Amino acid sequence: MTASPIDPAQLARLADVAVNVGLNLQPGQDLILTAPAEALPLVRAIAQSAYRAGAGVVTPILSDDEIARARFRHASDASFDRAPDWLYKGMAQAFDAGAGRMAIAGADPMALAGEDPEKVARANKANSLAYKPALEKISTFEINWTIAAYPTVGWARQVFPDLPEEEAVRTLAEAIFAASRVAGDDPVGAWAAHNAALRERSSWLNAERFDALHFTGPGTDLMVGLAEGHEWHGGASTAQNGVTCNPNIPTEEVFTTPHAHRVDGTVRATKPLSYNGALIEEIEMRFEGGRAVEARSSKGETVLHRMIDSDEGARRLGEVALVPFSSPISQTGLLFYNTLFDENAACHIAMGQCYSKCFLDGASLSSEQIAAQGGNSSVIHVDWMIGGPDTDIDGVRADGTRVPVFRKGEWAR
């Protein structure tokens, strides 16, 4: 039996950080954990760490690329308009009962690249609609939740196509460990310092109370109005259940809610978007009154159009996030084919659902109040990258005065 190319000590550290820093699992709290079947070594390490932290019951739900492909190759046509709503209703009930949520990213991003894109889109839409009862608990931040990553073979092959399989997995694992801040001697201390730095950025933006952000760069001249009563977040946040957690392991962003009806201008992607088994390259969109009225890409345009036609809210923005070009993930020079990593390499926007936590007193606002203040609603939330070394951003106050926020891809202060 050959040794795994993944350092077991680092994997154990990642599990501990995911449980104690990412999720901040509470004594007696149950955990719902989803992951690719190939990530079972990390799932086991997380279960051990969770039970050491006093978990009630850890329930893993595993997925598998081969099983997913079997559906597209052998299932009846009607299958692609169905999803396991019973499972997601059960997850929502578990969250209502106090369970935490953890997801392990790592599935092969191109696992469905050879399948019928129409069926992929239909299956994704059906799944998004079925998942909504559980997703609402996450998007409204009712519960503590987090996402971490595991270096699967399929994913590693995409990121490092020229390396032998074992070396590709090892190299991806090292990149994950470094980005997740578990490679040093004191991961918990490293995360505390990082959270403090992100908190300083978000506190400054909250104090400024900008009315809009103006993005300029190659192919981009975009005015993003900010929702009324918006609030910037970054790093650790406190959920409605009172637990402070880090939703993303890793993270480099500060983010808030744009106004769904006050986005105007043109924007060009600075990195490809991996979505539903397709690579969408060189995205360009034009917005009027908050709505994407034109969208094109040099590759994957059909998938792009299906994505933004998922529902009415899919053509509007639900998030705007600031990430400097000097981000450690950006400096790797890698395209990870995974939004958890790629969104932390560049400033980005997200089509679709907003986060209610990105409003002052968001926990007390109804969905109608969030909409009235400019928050968007959709069955999707898809981030795509628009920042780079030539990105400038001005904060625009209600009186029209401007404050430099980014210059040449970096914080201006």
Image (cartoon, grey):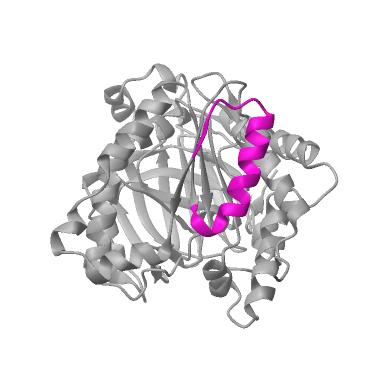
Q: Which residue is located at x 43 percent, y 37 percent?
A: 257
Image position, residue 3 (x, y; %): 73, 67
Q: Vertically, is 373 above or below 153?
A: above
Query: On the rendered image, what quadrant is the N terminus found in?
Result: bottom right
Quadrant containing the C terminus is top right
Q: Residue furthest top?
A: 364
Magenta stretch secondary structure, dominant: helix
**Quarter residue 253 falls in:** top right
Q: Residue 99, percent across and down?
A: 48, 27
Q: Position of residue 193 (x, y in %)?
A: 77, 37
Residue at 69% x, 33% y is 200
**Which corner quadrant of the image does residue 95 belong to?**
top left
Numbered label tally: 0
Pick whichever, 91 or 246, lies toward us. Answer: 91
Q: Is residue 46 magenta?
A: yes
- Quadrant hosting residue 65: bottom left
User: Is residue 6 inside the magenta stretch?
Assistant: no
Q: Which residue is at 26% across, 24% downward?
A: 368
Q: Residue furthest right?
A: 185
- For residue 353, say whether it is visible: yes
Query: Foreground: 403 or 43?
Result: 43
Q: Which residues are magenta?
A: 36-59
